[in-house]
Image: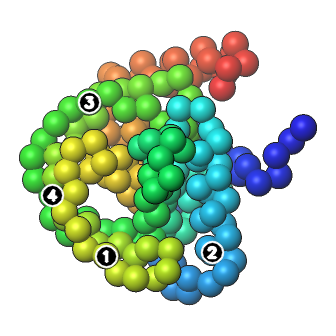
């Protein structure tokens, strides 16, 4: 049986993933309901910890993150119009992405960020975040800026990833 609350996750090659998402001006019921569907989709997608609106076809600046993968009641982080004001430190780790199923690549990111965003109620929040959550937030903001993990690797690695995507497509796994 199909779950109508689940949103379609767009994959590499879909144009919506390359657009710079529009700032949310009016946090109305329609936008809040959409963000709730994003959260539901995230928490009902295997092995998912972050989801940005462009990944589900909406070019707006919203993202949901749940490092607990639905295990913790208060594990959901909602980012509306997020902006990194400062960043420091560097670390490279393998990153996967729902828009690149079965692919992971090493990505260099800041280890600490100072973030400004709004919550689901429209309240502005400014906070310092470090560690893995800082990495995930940077990944999600990349989506909002139309930047994908494949854009952050060397041209040689990019060629390898594109070859791997073609193989997965051929095998019906993409």
Can you identify the residue that label 4 sits on?
87
Q: Is there any visible trace of residue 144 in the rendered image?
A: no
Q: Could you tell which of marks 4 and 3 lies nearer the N-terminus?
A: 4
Helix, strand or loop status at disc 2: helix
Residue that carries the numbered disc 2 in the rendered image: 31
Looking at the image, is mark 3 or mark 2 earlier in the sequence? 2
SS state under label 1: strand
Q: Is residue 15 left or right of residue 6?
A: left
**Tag in front: 1 or 4:** 1
Local packing at callout 1 (Cα closer than 10 Å; few below 14, some 14-19, many 20+) is few
**Left or right side of 6 for 93:** left
Disc 2 packing (10 Å; few <14; some 14–19; many ≥20): some
> Looking at the image, which is closer to me, 73 or 169?
73
Residue 146 spot, x, y in % from top left:
45, 55
Can you tell which mark lies on residue 125?
1
In front of the other: label 1 or label 3? 1
Instruction: Rate crowding at label 3 as few (under 14), some (14 to 19) or many (20 or more) other CA atoms within 10 Å.
Output: few
Of callouts 4 and 2, the N-terminal one: 2
* C-alpha span from label 1 to label 4: 16 Å
Which residue does the image show at 67% across and 59% down from the upper left?
37
């Amino acid at each position: 049986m199909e779950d109508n609350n689940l949103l379609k996750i767009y994959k590499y090659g879909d144009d919506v993933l390359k657009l710079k998402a529009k700032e949310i001006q009016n946090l109305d019921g329609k936008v809040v309901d959409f963000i709730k569907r994003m959260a539901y989709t995230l928490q009902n997608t295997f092995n998912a910890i972050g989801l940005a609106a462009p990944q589900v076809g909406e070019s707006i600046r919203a993202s949901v993150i749940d490092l607990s993968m639905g295990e913790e009641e208060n594990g959901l982080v909602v980012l509306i119009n997020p902006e990194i004001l400062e960043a420091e430190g560097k670390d490279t780790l393998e990153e996967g992405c729902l828009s690149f199923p079965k692919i992971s690549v090493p990505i260099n990111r800041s280890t600490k960020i100072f973030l400004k965003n709004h919550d689901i109620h429209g309240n502005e929040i400014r906070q310092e975040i470090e560690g893995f959550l800082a990495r995930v937030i940077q990944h999600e903001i990349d989506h909002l800026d139309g930047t994908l993990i494949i854009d952050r690797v060397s041209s040689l690695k990019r060629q390898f990833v594109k070859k791997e995507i073609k193989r997965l497509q051929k095998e019906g796994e993409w």
